[in-house]
Structures are given as structure tokens and as C-alpha cells.
Image (cartoon, rainbow, N blue to C red):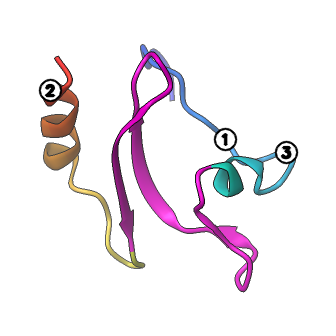
Amino acid sequence: MGNIPYPLVSDFHPHGEMSKAYDLWNGDRGTSNRAVLIVDREGIIRYRHEYAPPTLPNPADILAEVEKLG
């Protein structure tokens, strides 16, 4: 993705570990639920929203949440 100034998490290996840690794993499908989480520098989740397919996150809404954090 290039030049992103913040870390992103991946669930590639071991499969599902991050989704399970954030209670987003869907065992029936064998995949994670679609979600956006904003985690602050202390590791506290400040925003969490799950999206049912085919709904996509609205970037403006996410940016507004980030701006609330200062």
C-alpha cells in the first residue's frame, strides 16, 4: 500500500489469530468479519465498527473518528 504512517494488522499467519484476538472471527465461514478498529498508541480500542457484506466503510466516517482522537 506504500507510505502508510501507521501500522496495519494482517491475519495471514497464523490464520485468524488477529480476528480471534479482536473477537471478529467467524468460525462458520472460516474468515473474519469485516470491521474497522482504531487502536490508540496505548493499545486501547477507541473505535470499532463491523460491516455486513457488501457494506463498505465510509472513509469520511473513519477519518472523523481518527480526528476525534486528536
Residue 56 relative to residue 59: left or right: right
Q: Quadrant of the C terminus?
A: top left
Lower position in the chain sequence, tag 1 or tag 2: 1
The stretch of residues the image draws in magenta is 22-51
Say few, some or many: other residues with alpha carbon within 10 Å of mark 1 (under 14 / 14 to 19 / 20 or more): few
Q: Are marks 1 and 2 in contact (CB under 8 Å)?
A: no
Say few, some or many: other residues with alpha carbon within 10 Å of mark 3 (under 14 / 14 to 19 / 20 or more): few
Secondary structure at numbered mark 3? loop
The image quadrant that residue 5 belongs to is top left
- The residue depicted at 32 percent of the width and 65 percent of the height is 56
Residue 16 lies, with reference to residue 51, above or below; the image says: above
Kind of residue indicated by mark 2: Glu
Give me the C-alpha separation between circle 2 and circle 3. Answer: 31 Å
Q: Are marks 1 and 3 in contact (CB under 8 Å)?
A: no
Mark 1 or 2: the one toward you:
2
Residue topped by disc 3 = 13
Residue topped by disc 2 = 67
- The residue depicted at 19 percent of the width and 38 percent of the height is 65
